[in-house]
């Protein structure tokens, strides 16, 4: 009788745990956005498998940071922007918001430009028209969160994540990379200044500041602020599983992007761009695989644009202490993205550079996060383990050093 009861309790616990998954998959959209596509395609096309190790390292670091963000939200009942804002006076808080807003603009530029490229590939639409459509559709997706609730929004975004994964992994059913080359790409190394630039872009596209800010708010919207006890312990355990699963999916998709480019673009007389990748895939793997690639890119642009706007609204609310209408919030970051398209900048290069801008915003998100989650007065029993704190500081230091090197190499090459 006791065994039957235990089995029923275990089954109920598992069912409950699976139901609680979801916030990390919404945050994971940030890790498979068009900026990732541009950075990974550029890296694979120019250097083959050389920078595959950067994707692996970046996803491991991102998993740690995302869990800390979610833990902060569950334990304190505050989003990361709100928790940061509470520690600052008004001038400092506004200055911090300015840099966060610049990062949000760079984020939206990547999402909208990526969606525009996908619509251009699929339907021949002008890039500016495609950018407007991407912005409008992403706003419609956000209405799901307002009108239907967090769970419906999570399910739609997770469904789009599945479309992205299929779109970018489909080519492996036709052509697979050589195992020895893949293993060689896991050995950490660089090859000149451009590889450092691409590594910074990959890192900025993976450990994304707005995803770090957002995850703390996502778990609050989904789970509320549980009191210390059994429910909080359960939610923290489920959150760890949620993050591991979501980052495993995101990491696989990112690696697939680079491998697709390495297989189809390296040593070929084609442009090292998203359009070049589509053309090469079309000529080598056929129309079906190429269309799936474009559909994956479109789903990436639409989903990540809506998630980015969600994060931007959370940042504004936490740092400015005021709610901003979603339409206004959307226009703030959408207009610069449309300006890039209207002025005729190379879209793939704009995507890569946007990810470099994001890498500069990472320390501003990660450093306060590590400080806050290491604060025993704030976190109580859930304060970071000393090893976790050291790893968190290492992530911030690594990104900061990489950015200094990137500035030096960029100035030197000018």
Image: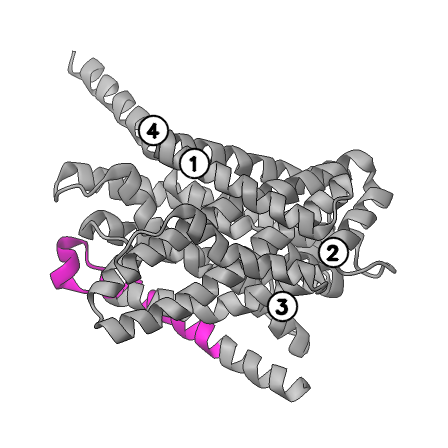
SS at circle 4: helix
The residue that mark 2 highlights is 262
The numbered mark, 4 or 1, whose residue comes first in the sequence reads: 4
The numbered mark, 4 or 3, whose residue comes first in the sequence reads: 4
Tag 1: Cα neighbours inside 10 Å, few (<14), some, or many (≥20)?
some
Whether label 2 touches label 1, CB < 8 Å: no
SS at circle 3: helix
The quadrant of the rendering that contains the C terminus is bottom right
Q: Residue at x 20, y 41 (%)?
A: 233
State which mark lies toward you, 2 or 1.
Answer: 1
The residue that mark 4 highlights is 19
Inter-mark Cα distance, 2 to 4: 38 Å
Q: Is residue 106 above or below residue 178?
A: below
SS at circle 1: helix
Whether label 1 touches label 3, CB < 8 Å: no
The stretch drawn in magenta includes residue 328: no
The numbered mark, 3 or 2, whose residue comes first in the sequence reads: 3
- Hey, which residue is sitting farthest bottom in the picture? 412
Q: What percent of the width, then of the height, locates residue 109?
A: 57, 58
Q: Is residue 166 above or below residue 300?
A: above
């Amino acid at each position: 009788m006791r065994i039957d009861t235990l089995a029923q309790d275990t089954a109920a616990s598992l069912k409950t745990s699976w139901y609680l998954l979801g916030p990390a998959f919404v945050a994971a959209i940030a890790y498979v956005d068009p900026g990732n596509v541009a950075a990974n395609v550029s890296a694979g096309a120019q250097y083959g498998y050389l920078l595959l190790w950067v994707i692996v390292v970046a996803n491991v670091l991102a998993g740690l940071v995302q869990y800390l963000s979610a833990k902060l939200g569950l334990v304190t009942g505050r989003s990361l922007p709100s928790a940061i804002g509470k520690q600052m006076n008004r001038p400092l808080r506004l200055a911090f918001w300015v840099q966060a807003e610049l990062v949000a603009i760079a984020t939206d530029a990547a999402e909208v430009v990526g969606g525009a490229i996908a619509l251009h590939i699929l339907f021949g639409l002008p890039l500016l028209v495609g950018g407007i459509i991407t912005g409008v559709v992403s706003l419609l997706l956000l209405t799901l969160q307002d009108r239907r609730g967090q769970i419906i929004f999570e399910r739609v975004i997770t469904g789009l994540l599945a479309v992205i994964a299929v779109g970018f992994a489909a080519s492996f059913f036709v052509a697979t990379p050589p195992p020895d080359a893949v293993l060689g790409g896991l050995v950490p190394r660089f090859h000149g200044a451009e590889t450092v630039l691409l590594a910074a872009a990959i890192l900025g596209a993976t450990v994304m500041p707005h995803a770090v800010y957002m995850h703390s708010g996502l778990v609050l919207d989904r789970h509320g602020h549980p009191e210390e006890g059994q429910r909080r312990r359960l939610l923290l355990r489920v959150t760890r599983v949620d993050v591991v699963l979501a980052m495993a999916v995101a990491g696989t998709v990112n690696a697939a992007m680079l491998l697709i480019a390495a297989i189809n673009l390296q040593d070929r007389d084609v442009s090292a761009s998203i359009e070049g990748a589509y053309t090469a895939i079309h000529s080598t793997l056929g129309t079906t695989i190429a269309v799936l690639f474009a559909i994956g890119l479109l789903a990436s642009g639409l989903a990540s644009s809506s998630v980015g706007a969600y994060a931007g609204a959370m940042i504004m609310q936490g740092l400015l202490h005021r709610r901003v209408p979603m339409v206004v919030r959307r226009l703030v970051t959408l207009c610069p993205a449309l300006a890039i398209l209207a002025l005729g900048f190379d879209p793939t290069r704009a995507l890569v550079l946007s990810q470099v801008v994001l890498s500069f915003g990472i320390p501003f998100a990660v450093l306060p996060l590590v400080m806050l989650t290491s604060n025993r007065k704030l976190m109580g029993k859930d304060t970071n383990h000393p090893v976790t704190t050291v790893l968190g500081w290492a992530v911030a230091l690594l990104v900061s050093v990489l950015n200094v090197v990137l500035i030096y190499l960029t100035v030197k090459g000018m």
